[in-house]
Image (cartoon, coloured by chain):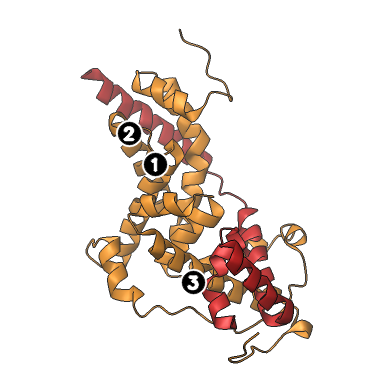
């Protein structure tokens, strides 16, 4: 029965084969997704050792819990879920906090969350295509990301960078979709603000209109 | 539609999931409001930039350790099966 494992073999099939006892299949899954998991961990934790720990924990956990994975979400979403929780745990530990559920924390802080108003409004001097060519751009992006609260950073990374849907993001983080949307909005606006301060053309800077109806 | 309201629905508009009727209002507002236009454009570019970002490469030694650890764990968990 065993077909060769190729780049075309789907994750779903690899998962089935891993469950059936094929180590090669699990190794292939790891190889496919390790960079993604590591990148998420690095962007959340900004520290190589911690990112490595989280990455290793994630795949070990996936290995141990493979039997319980029923394939309702995609395998990669499942991995990102495990990695997200592991990363948040590290951050909480850094802050010296006890493990609280994300939801509980949300209720406490989200009520005072208002939408940040765009302050610095200006056209960017270059297009994204031009900007990605610049060597320092990755550092600028990571810097801006690191200034976000980790709750907002994580949602942005899962939704906009990893391409999970709002629903998948909500499921991965045990949040309501409404919560995800609010956090996503804040993240996007804050990043826009920071990036525009550096990348915006001061010559085109606009002042924010106040209470105008159009 | 005020600039304020537009801000709250920015996600949906940028993601293309907004109700068509609201989308109309949104675009009417944008047609007459340069700051909002620029903000929407900025946001689109922000997302594009991050999407195009480089993934982090696993350090080679770490990758080896990771796969070794997985093989070890696999042996353990499959011994008892």
Lower sequence index among marks 2 and 1: 2
Determine the chain carrying the residue at label 3: A
Tell me the quarter of the image containing the N terminus of chain A: top left
Q: Please report the residue visible at 46 percent of the width from the left and 31 percent of the height from the top.
A: A29
Question: Which disc, if any, is residue A69?
Answer: 2
Query: Chain A's colour?
Result: orange
Q: Are marks 2 and 1 in contact (CB under 8 Å)?
A: yes
Read off the residue under disc 3: A186
Tally the numbered discs: 3
Marks 3 and 2 belong to one chain: yes
As displayed, is residue A107 above or below residue A135? below
Q: Residue A24 bears which disc, if any?
A: none
Please give the name of the residue rendered at 42% of the width and 32% of the height, measured from the top-left corner.
B67
Residue B49 pos. (x, y %): 65, 60
On the image, numbered disc 1 is attached to which residue?
Answer: A78
Front residue of A214/A167: it is A214
Closer to us: A32 or A151: A151
Q: Position of residue B57 (x, y in %)?
A: 56, 45
1 and 3 marks on the same chain: yes
Chain on which label 1 sits: A
Sequence-first tag of 3 and 2: 2
Supply the letter of whichever chain is red: B
């Amino acid at each position: 029965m065993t077909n060769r494992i190729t780049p075309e073999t789907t994750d779903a099939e690899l998962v089935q084969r891993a469950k059936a006892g094929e180590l090669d299949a699990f190794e292939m899954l790891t190889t496919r997704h390790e960079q993604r998991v590591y990148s998420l961990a690095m962007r959340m934790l900004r520290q190589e050792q911690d990112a490595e720990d989280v990455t290793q924990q994630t795949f070990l956990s996936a290995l141990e819990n493979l039997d319980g994975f029923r394939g309702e979400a995609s395998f990669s979403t499942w991995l990102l879920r495990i990695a997200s929780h592991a990363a948040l745990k590290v951050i909480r530990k850094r802050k010296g906090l006890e493990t609280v559920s994300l939801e509980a924390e949300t209720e406490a802080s989200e009520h005072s969350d208002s939408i940040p108003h765009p302050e610095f409004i200006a056209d960017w001097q270059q297009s994204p295509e031009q900007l990605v060519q610049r060597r320092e751009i990755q550092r600028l992006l990571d810097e801006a990301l690191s200034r976000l609260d980790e709750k907002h950073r994580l949602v942005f990374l899962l939704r906009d960078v990893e391409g999970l849907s709002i629903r998948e993001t909500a499921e991965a983080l045990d949040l309501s979709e409404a919560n995800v949307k609010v956090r996503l909005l804040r993240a996007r606006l804050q990043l826009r603000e920071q990036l525009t301060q550096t990348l915006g053309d001061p010559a085109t800077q606009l002042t924010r209109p106040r209470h105008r109806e159009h | 539609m005020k600039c304020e309201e537009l801000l709250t629905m920015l996600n949906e508009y940028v993601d293309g999931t907004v109700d068509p009727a609201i989308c109309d209002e949104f675009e009417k507002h944008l047609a007459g409001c340069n700051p909002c236009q620029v903000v929407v454009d900025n946001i689109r570019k922000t997302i594009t930039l991050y999407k195009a970002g480089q993934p982090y490469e696993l350090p080679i030694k770490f990758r080896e350790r990771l796969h070794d650890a997985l093989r070890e764990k696999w042996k353990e968990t499959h011994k008892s099966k």
